[in-house]
Image (cartoon, grey):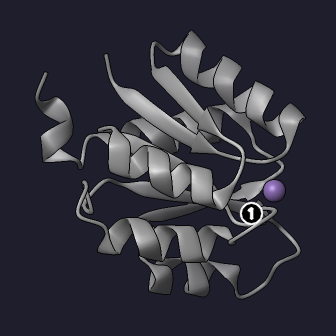
């Protein structure tokens, strides 16, 4: 089963993402802070990370940089999630090392399409 790490501080967004991913057969692990997410990514192997940009401690960009620099799986695909109003976030997300970018509010079909598209890019994710 493909494993997804969801780093998101907002409970209702987290709930929605969890439901969508579980309905589509993914196993999920959640983190509610940037630091917590970085720790989880270093500790366990994931096939994809969903990264909220606005987090209570370090933001999603910093968390992405740390994951990319970590000794864990620095190649894991990371999809940044941020609000529509934050213009410039897209460029910043790619600069920080995000693989893809989606805007809130999350559209279920679009969200799952992105997940399925990018999760496959991780060759390591195909290992048991
Ligand atoms: Mn947030």
What is the x, y in percent for residue 128? 13, 21
User: In the displayed structure, does residue 104 sit left or right of residue 78?
Assistant: right
What is the x, y in percent for residue 95? 47, 86
- Decide: is 125 above or below 54: above
Residue 55 figure quarter: bottom right
Residue at horizontal 46 percent and vertical 44 percent from the top:
40
User: In the displayed structure, does residue 13 sit left or right of residue 39?
Assistant: right
User: In the displayed structure, does residue 7 sit left or right of residue 42?
Assistant: right
What is the x, y in percent for residue 57? 75, 67
State the residue in front, 4 or 121.
Answer: 4
- Decide: is 21 above or below 96: above
Ligand 1 has an atom within 8 Å of the beta carbon of the residue at disc 1: no
Residue at horizontal 57 percent and vertical 86 percent from the top:
91
Residue at horizontal 11 percent and vertical 29 percent from the top:
127
User: In the displayed structure, does residue 25 sit left or right of residue 20?
Assistant: left
Residue at horizontal 51 percent and vertical 16 percent from the top:
24
The residue beneath circle 1 is 82
**Element carrying mark 1:** strand
Residue 83 figure quarter: bottom right
Q: Quadrant of ligand 1?
A: bottom right
Query: Dot 1: within a 10 Å radius of its alpha carbon, few (fewer than 14), some, or many (20 or more) residues?
Result: many
């Amino acid at each position: 089963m493909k494993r997804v790490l969801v780093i998101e501080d907002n409970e209702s967004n987290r709930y929605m993402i969890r439901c969508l991913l579980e309905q589509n057969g993914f196993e999920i692990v959640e983190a509610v802070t940037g630091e917590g997410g970085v720790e989880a990514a270093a500790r366990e192997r994931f096939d994809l990370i969903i990264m909220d940009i606005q987090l209570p401690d370090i933001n999603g960009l910093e968390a992405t940089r740390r994951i990319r620099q970590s000794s864990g799986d620095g190649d894991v695909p990371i999809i940044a999630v941020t609000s529509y109003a934050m213009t410039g976030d897209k460029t910043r997300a790619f600069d920080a090392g995000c693989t893809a970018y989606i805007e809130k509010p999350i559209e279920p079909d679009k969200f799952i399409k992105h997940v399925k598209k990018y999760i496959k890019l991780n060759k390591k994710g195909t290992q048991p």
